[in-house]
Image (cartoon, rainbow, N blue to C red):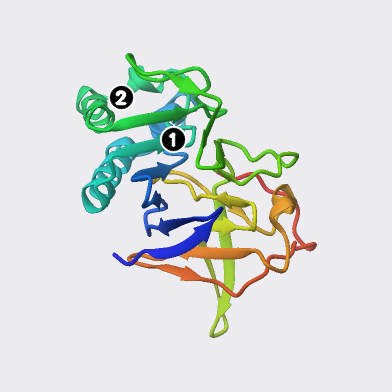
Amino acid sequence: MSNRSTDFAGHGFDMHPSGALFWRDASLLIVGDLHLEKGSSYHRSGQFLPPYDTAQTLARLVQVLTELAPRRLLFLGDVFHDGAAWTRMVPQDRQTLLDITEARDTIWVEGNHDQSFVPPGHRACAVHEEGGIVFRHIMDEADQRPEISAHYHPAGVVSHRGARLRRPCFVQTSTRIVVPAFGVLTGGLDCRDAALAALHGTTTRLFLLGADSVFAAPQGLVPDTARRHRRRG
């Protein structure tokens, strides 16, 4: 797979086509919004989805960890879709997650879906700070320190040869990076949405995920005034 490198807050990062962000010098892999057991959560409302999203997301994570071999792993929140997800996971998936986290130093940042819950033997924090960068689940528009966050499941829309292409993406400004959702059963919020107004600007950069590469869109991000705010899936 082909990563795309970017500089942020004086450090070098690699954007992986899976949606993971790799801080090379810190040997830290950063992923957000896995939403494990989202499929099983839908069963309670009568929406029956194939119960394979957790296994597929974890398999993707194992593949990226094998490829990049980081010493450390940082979860940017919403690892689980809800507080009961851990109990709904099949034993094999629970063991896979434990094997992943026990094999390397793991930092758990709380999300809004899994607040105050981590697997037994682990501890979570609201914010992690390292190398002059603040890591949190939801960006804080009032904090002007360099920040890496998740939560919004950003998706970029570009036009190419008369067609419109919509893909999950990284969003980067001078002070922020918002990572795409890593889970296989997650929707996306158009980056032009008013909810992401803090990221709009002429120098904003979008990096769209392809099957095997990350592609840079033309620089600049402006709101789409013709569309209403839509929540991500």
Q: Residue at x 68, y 38 (%)?
A: 140
Q: Is residue 37 placed above or below 208 in the rendered structure? A: above
Distance Cα–Cα, label 1 vs label 2: 12 Å
In this rendering, is residue 219 above or below 60?
below
Q: Which mark is residue 82?
A: none
Q: Position of residue 128 (x, y in %)?
A: 52, 31
Q: Is residue 72 left or right of residue 176?
A: left
Q: Amino acid at mark 1?
A: His
Q: Nearer the viewer, residue 166 or 204?
A: 204
Corner quadrant of residue 137: top right
Give percent across and percent down for residue 8: 54, 56
The residue where tag 2 is placed is 89
Q: Is residue 158 above or below residue 34?
A: below
How crowded pointer 2 is (Cα within 10 Å; few <14, some 14-19, many 20+) is rated as some
Pointer 1: what residue?
A: 35
Q: Is residue 184 left or right of residue 193?
A: left
- Residue at 73%, 42% in the rendered image: 141
